[in-house]
Amino acid sequence: AIDVSGGRRDVTLESVSGPMKASQLSGDLEAQNVSGSIRAENVSGRIEAWTVNGAIRLIGVRSNDIRAETVGGDIVYAGRVNTGSTYDFESHSGAVRLSIPRSLGARFRLETVSGTIQTDFPTGTVPADGGRKGGRVEFTVGDGRADVTARTFSGRIAIQGTGDPTIRKDSISIVRSDSVSRTRRDSVPTPRKDSIPAIRGEIQS
């Protein structure tokens, strides 16, 4: 295992097999693992995290630039979404779960091939092209001055808004991979399954 705390400037972690943890960093973090998890807590700089078979957990980070990618694990992010920042999360067969403030301002792009998308944030109306995007949902919250992208092949994407304990459970919109985003089930007609074009079997990073 690798456990680093209190680093400054540039911190690089590499492992073939074993968990990795970095905490209380005042600088950039680059972590690469083959068969093991990556966990980062209270990191203030740029974060690049990559693993083949393991989960990535980013907790309480204050980064303006995050790139996290795993093939066979979940990605969990709990932290801020800063103005002008870019956040990119990608998992092949695992889930992507984000816990972010409801008061943020960001543009969201969520893509999945055979998974589902669930979000606390309103996704708006049917897209201008008729909603035939399959497992792709795009929407803007607030001023849209940050970019948040989440992609999976077969995993679930779930976005939870924090800071509002009164949110109703039934207000969460759920998007099937073969349908479109809808805020209320009775407000948007559900397209016929055979009317949705086929989705390519790969996601471009």
Image (spheres, rainbow, N blue to C red):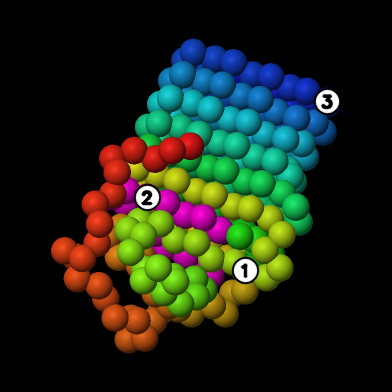
Q: Assess whether mark 1 and mark 3 are in contact (beta carbons under 8 angstroms).
A: no
State the CA–CA distance, disc 1 to disc 2: 20 Å
Quadrant in which the N terminus appears? top right
Tell me which corner region of the image, top left, top right, bottom left or bottom right, holds residue 172: bottom left
Mark 3 and mark 1: Cα distance apart in space: 32 Å
Per the model, the C-alpha gap separating discs 3 and 2 is 35 Å
Residue under numbered circle 3: 9
**Which residue of the protein is positioned furthest toward the top in this rendering?**
16
Tell me which residue sits at (50%, 48%) in the image.
150
Left or right: residue 132 versus residue 172 is: left
In this view, 44 is above or below 164: above
Q: Do labels 3 and 2 touch, CB within 8 Å?
A: no
- Report the amino acid beneath label 1: Val
Residue type beneath disc 3: Arg
User: Which residue type carries mark 2?
Assistant: Thr
Q: Is residue 174 visible?
A: no
- In x, y percent, where is residue 36? 47, 23
Question: Would residue 77 be seen by someone viewing this image from the given angle?
Answer: yes
Q: Which residues are magenta?
A: 108-121
**Secondary element type, mark 1:** strand
* Location of residue 176 in the rendering, given as x and y in whole percent from the top left corner: 30, 62
Dot placed on the residue nearer the N-terminal end, 3 or 2 = 3
Q: Where's residue 170, x and y in %?
A: 41, 79
